[in-house]
Image: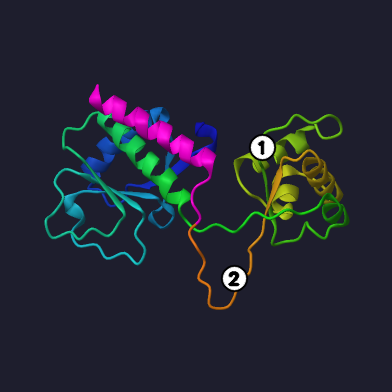
Amino acid sequence: MKKNLSGDIATGLLSPALRARFLELFSVASRKSVFAWREAALLRAQVLVLDASAGHIDLPHWPPCVIWVGEQPARWMRASTWVGRLPPDYTVADLIDMLDRAAVFLMDWKARQPQPAFVPVGAQALATGQGADATARYRLASWVALAAPFNGPSYLRALAMLAREAVTVAQLQEHGGLAPEQARALLVELRQRGVLRTQVVAAQPVGVQPGHPAPGAGQRRLVQRLTHWLRGAIRT
């Protein structure tokens, strides 16, 4: 599961001593959490770790999650959607629990964000290149084992990308190492097998605001299982 779930966390605003301790425990906790966490710059982070030494902070865009180490200042205004707190003497187990709580929130939060609609694109359109344009994104609905010539290393890399996220034909070619005709042939094969989902940005009618689609059934079940598991761990 962790191969498809990852999160970015920013620690640069911690005081030097607290940051050194956090990173030491984080090196262990990040390997045991639901997400494959990695340290990142603040602009890219989904989780920001703070302590009282940060003082007044005015960010143009706050990450959805904030974790406080120690006491949260009374003057601090809640700018993020989810806030957690670690005691000053927190352990690796405490940090794992906090990271897992943030992971469960982020999975649900991401599922609730507006997404471009997935619409069918016929195999004939893909074969002629009409459905394989720069704006369309493709993703596997389920993993499938393909026979030659689609079982070579380049095709397997492309399949791994399609299983992980929605990608464009250009990304398949660049990161999968496929020629344009190979990428189209792979998409046609996957479409014929019924395992390819195509994502395009659907035009909104005038005067109609884009909605917030509900999470898919698989995403909801995953969040429910993880939430149940975390609650059970807390009770024990």
**Identity of the residue drawn at 75% across and 49% down:** 173
The quadrant of the rendering that contains the C terminus is top left
Q: How is the image coloured?
A: rainbow
What separation in Å lies between label 2 and label 1 (alpha carbons)? 32 Å
**Identity of the residue drawn at 40% across and 32% down:** 226
**Identity of the residue drawn at 34% across and 59% down:** 62
Image coordinates for residue 207, horizontal then vertical, percent: 53, 78
Relative depth, front residue between 229 and 52: 229
Residue range highlighted in magenta: 213-236
User: Secondary structure beneath disc 2?
Assistant: loop
Count the marks: how many?
2
- Graded by Cα atoms within 10 Å as few (under 14), some (14 to 19) or many (20 or more), the crowding at tag 2 reads few
- Graded by Cα atoms within 10 Å as few (under 14), some (14 to 19) or many (20 or more), the crowding at tag 1 reads some
| Mark number displayed over residue 160 | 1
| Mark number displayed over residue 88 | none
Relative depth, front residue between 106 and 224: 224
- Residue 231: in magenta span: yes
User: Secondary structure beneath disc 1?
Assistant: helix
| Residue at the disc numbered 2 | 204
Q: Quadrant of residue 164?
A: top right
**Identity of the residue drawn at 41% across and 35% down:** 224
Seen from this angle, which residue lies furthest top?
236
Specify the amino acid type for callout 2. Gln
Tags 2 and 1 touching, CB below 8 Å:
no
- Residue 58: in magenta span: no
Relative depth, front residue between 232 and 206: 206
